[in-house]
Image (cartoon, rainbow, N blue to C red):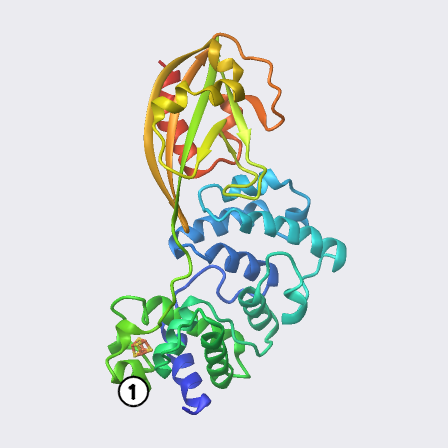
Amino acid sequence: MKKPFHFAESLLNWYKNNARTLPFRNEVSPYAIWISEVILQQTRVNQGLEYYRRFMARFPNIKSLAESTEEEVLKIWQGLGYYSRARNLHEAAQQIMSLYHGQMPSSYQELKKIKGIGPYTAAAISSIAFQEVIPAIDGNAKRVFSRFLGINTPVNTSSGSVLIEKAAFSFIDPFQPGNFNQAVMELGAMICTPKRPSCTNCPLLSECIAYKENQIEYIPLKVKKHVVKERSIFYFVFYSKAEDTVQLIMHQRTRNDIWKGLYDFPSLEFNEAMNVQKVIESEILKQQFPYVKFAELQSINGPLKHILTHRILWLHFSVYELSVMPHIENKNHTIYTLHEVLGLPLPRPIEIFLKEFMGKTILV
Ligand code: SF4
């Protein structure tokens, strides 16, 4: 095993001279570190930065986040995906207000008790804000450590995780754990990238086993865990025009499923491919949305393909004009003006549909 000091020293020297300037770097506020870590999970840095700035401007501290509504948080998050992150942040802020007097706990173990804060985020906050000596292991760190040590055990198995964690504990600099963790992640993001890593610019090159043994393209090894499922969603866009106001029936997604808490249109969903004509003529449609009988079908759009992590969605949009808005019995369906709809938290494809297609359909 390499001497920990050698690894940390080479890495930290490189980090000092090469780290990107990001607004949350040098940040000591645990709240800001928490928000930046959550936003940057599963998000490219450029996109994440814009959301980070907007989020911090709207919710500058735990109190303001806790006192907002879930819808306000989802609206700021709109377009970033993985909406459970936003819902968890909101709930966590309320938990911190009630259980920790509004102060983020400072230890790894205590942080993990908070809603949505897993081992990686707890380690990032406790090491960067409170200098706790604990490695923060994300996908970048797994790649760097497994390549450096030539680990052939899949990194997404428990035995792989144990090996990576052992390596990280042996390498971490006990005097600068926060910088060390950020340096590992930065190296993974900038140099030791998944494809075509820039090894000749890497401070670990001389000792890297994957490089020496020509194993870079095979490490990190992963076992496939998820099968991508397909789903067809048939949206029914019911609207009416009265003078210069347009009203729409919107549906709030309340189930533990994709886009929970966000708004889309009334829909029928199937876990298989379906023929759109058969769906719009089906009895089930008339039973679920009786007012479809009084509506005029204006257009059928789609399917629009939308990819989520473990799902491919095929979205169909049937647009219906109603002469008057009906009485609505379904408690998840609500009538809004178009202006109000644009202020609701919307999944990305619904936002795109509304802007591109409804603009053409309604405003003619
Ligand atoms: S030498 Fe190449 S493979 Fe090894 S850690 Fe550096 S960038 Fe990654």
Residue under numbered circle 1:
206
Q: Quadrant of residue 187?
A: bottom left
SS label for mark 1: helix
Q: Please name the amino acid that badge 1 sits on.
A: Ser
State which quarter of the image contains the N terminus: bottom left
Q: Identify the residue shown where x is 26% and y is 76%.
A: 199
Query: Residue at the location (52% across, 74% down)?
Result: 178
Disc 1 Cβ-to-ligand 1 distance below 8 Å: no
**In the rendered view of the protein, which quadrant contains the C terminus?**
top left
Q: Is residue 203 above or below residue 139?
A: below
Q: Name the side, left or right, on which 289 lies relative to 113.
A: left
Percent position of residue 167, x then y: 46, 82
Seen in the picture, residue 286 relative to 11 is either above or below; the reply is: above
State the residue at coordinates (64%, 40%): 69
- Horizontally, residue 349 falls left or right of residue 261, namely left
Where in the figure is residue 81, as x and y percent of width and height? Answer: 46, 46
Q: Is residue 244 visible?
A: no
Q: Is residue 137 visible?
A: yes
In-front residue for pair 33/209: 209
Q: Position of residue 260 (x, y in %)?
A: 55, 41
Few, some or many residues within 10 Å of mark 1 (<14, 14–19, 20+): few
